[in-house]
Image (tube, helix red, strand yellow):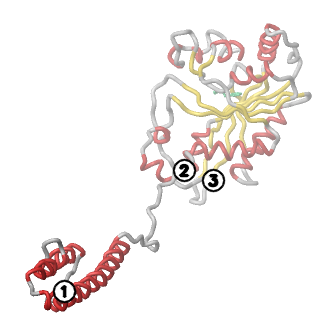
Amino acid sequence: MQHEAITEIQAAQTLDDLQGVKTRYVGKSGLVTKELGTLGRLPPEERKARGAEINAVRQAIDAALTEREGVLKRAALDAKLSSEAIDVTLPGLGLPSGGLHPINRVYDELIGIYERLGYAVVEGPEVEDEHYNFEALNVPWYHPARDLQDTFWLEDGRLLRTHTSPMQIRYMVEHEPALKVVVRGKVYRYEATDATHESMFHQLEGLVVGEGISMADLKGTIAEMARGLYGASAKVRFQPSYYPFVEPGADFAVWWENPRGESKWLELGGCGMIHPNVFKAVDDLREAQGKARVYEGQTGFAFGLGPERIAMLKYGVPDIRYFYANDPRVLGQFRGEL
Ligand code: PHE
């Protein structure tokens, strides 16, 4: 029996198998236990020897059980460890990284240029009062820009700003000259969209006011921006133009060339010397707020331009609407560009 039991114990492949063998031999009604139960029926002179014999068998079986249990437990632990092992040499799962929107990249470049020239950078409300968007900027009621067709009007009489120029007024009402500031932000026009027109787009507005500021400073500033964008040999062109809030007013363009040999005048925006009526409107607003009239008699210039035009050329984007359609095929191309 001892020999059979030990063969079975050594053959047990799992702890469950082993438990079965243990029950069969040394359990409550196991073979060894039963054998011990027969001792009482033996003549007293045989009992002692037989008892010792059976106990020796039992001890041998117990020892084999304990040893086999240790072996199987270690094997089970090893299997568990290797099945749960983490292979730290496997390549990781990459988290898709975002990227700066191309318009923000162009803004960063432009604003970097103006920061180096000592300009403050501000933003302002997109929901604007008619007075700041038009009247205070000397835009008369009959000017085509006031056309209901061009402006998103809100039910409360306010509007979505059609340009960043109302921030000229807001900034001057809050600050006294001299000042140099650029404004970044969204603007809105209620018009048909096509490859070069979108109902929401961006502007960068510049405003400089101070003693002796002249048209030459304006031209030099635009030229400095062009050199910052397109290198030391960048050329700029000014053409007379009309904006009610500047006089004289001009449109400016930058000669744009790329390594593929393409080149053209890139119409970037409008500019001019601040119209005296604008300074007067600012002083009126300041006076109504109990502030000193400090702008009449000042000189200054302003300019406004659209980063979309620069971004379209820089990145070869053929349609302005691609910037805002949130199509991952477009924006994915700027992934990781920070
Ligand atoms: N606000 C004008 C526009 O939206 C641009 C401009 C700004 C022109 C400042 C002159 C001076 O078209």
What residue sits right under mark 1 in the picture? 51
**Which residue occupies the foreground of this view, 28 or 84?**
28
**Which residue occupies the foreground of this view, 4 or 335?**
4
Q: Quadrant of residue 306?
A: top right
What residue sits right under mark 2 in the picture? 99
Name which residue type carries label 2. Answer: Gly
For numbered disc 1, what is the local secondary structure? helix
In front: mark 3 or mark 2?
A: 2
Residue 171 screen position, x and y as percent: 76, 24
Eyeballing the image, is 96 above or below 288?
below
Q: Quadrant of residue 172?
A: top right
Residue 15 screen position, x and y as percent: 24, 75
Eyeballing the image, is 238 above or below 102?
above
Q: Residue at x 45, y 34 (%)?
A: 194
Quadrant containing ligand 1 reads top right
Q: Is residue 93 left or right of residue 16?
A: right
For numbered disc 3, what is the local secondary structure? strand
The residue sitting at the front extreme is 44
Q: Which quadrant, please, contains the N terminus?
A: bottom left
Give the number of the disc on residue 135: none
Q: Earlier in the sequence, mark 1 or mark 3?
A: 1
Name which residue type carries label 1. Answer: Gly
Q: Earlier in the sequence, mark 3 or mark 2?
A: 2
Q: In whole angstroms, how far apart are the C-alphas of marks 2 and 1?
A: 85 Å
Q: Is residue 255 left or right of residue 297?
A: left
What residue sits right under mark 3 in the picture? 257
For numbered disc 2, what is the local secondary structure? loop
Q: Is residue 271 left or right of residue 61?
A: right
